[in-house]
Image (tube, grey):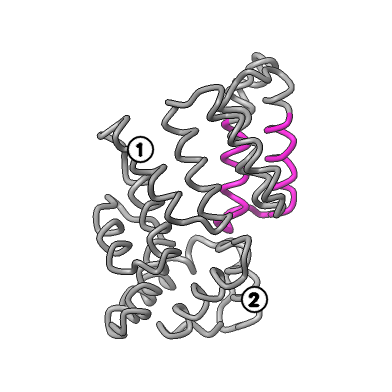
Amino acid sequence: LLRQAIDLDPGFGLAHASLSYVRAGQYEEGWADDPEAALSEALSEAKQAVALDGSDGYAHASLAYVLLRYREFDRAQNEVDIALKLNPNHVNIIMTAGWVSIVNCNPEQAIELIKRAFRLNPLMGSWQQWTLGQAYLDARRHRDALESFAKVMEPPTDLFLEAAVCHAHLGELDSALTNLRTYLERAKKELVLFPGDDPVAWRTFLLRYWTRRRMEFTDHFLEGARKAGLNV
């Protein structure tokens, strides 16, 4: 539908920005047949959105989101700062700012931003609870993370891996293994390239999925996955 909207109106910046988010998410989640092509298109669409309307905060936020995948952490922060200045009360922009803070290894700042988004829109959905849980995980507040994850309706596959990591770090290995098994069963059906029993492939996948500016945050996630029983 987004491509149809762009075909009908190439100057529709919101459609370009939204397509950028979608393609970047497909790259991140392992859903793209050609991950690099998906990421390249995400960057192109975000840049086009900004070029069409530099006063659109959502366009700048979409560019910030994609730049994180290229490890352009400072540029991502700059773009989301511009987005917030243009529209400080746009909930999706605030959530993107929270995600930029997570990836830039400022989880406590991310928690405050996400809570601000909830105050602006108390009816926000499961995606926001999931993101809050991810911020708690990086802050090593594993019990808080699990409480946030428990509020997610129809939890996505990756949430079960993150829950496994949290339980493992809390020493709750039975719960960790249960969540890991659920994750693996579902991921095998969803991932275009399922790593199977290959620890190198798992590490490559998780380094892309849990991208962080500082490696100790990614290592914390990988350590929890190992404790849970993932061969990585």
Residue at image point 42% right, 58% down: 134
As drawn, the label of residue 201 is 2
Residue at image point 59% right, 34% down: 81
Percent across and percent down for residue 52 are 71, 18
Percent across and percent down for residue 103 are 56, 55
As drawn, the label of residue 73 is none
Q: Specify the amino acid type for callout 2.
A: Ala
Residue at image point 49% right, 81% down: 223
Does residue 41 sit above or below 229 in this rendering? above
- Mark 2: few, some, or many residues within 10 Å (few <14, many ≥20)? some
Secondary structure mostly seen in magenta is: helix
**Is residue 2 something that shows in the picture?**
no
Percent across and percent down for residue 217 are 54, 69
The magenta segment is: 18-47
Percent across and percent down for residue 180 are 39, 76
Quadrant position of the C terminus in the picture: bottom right
Q: What secondary structure is marked by label 2? A: helix
- Mark 1: few, some, or many residues within 10 Å (few <14, many ≥20)? some
Compute the Cα span from label 1 to label 2.
Answer: 37 Å
Q: Mark 1 points at which residue?
A: 116
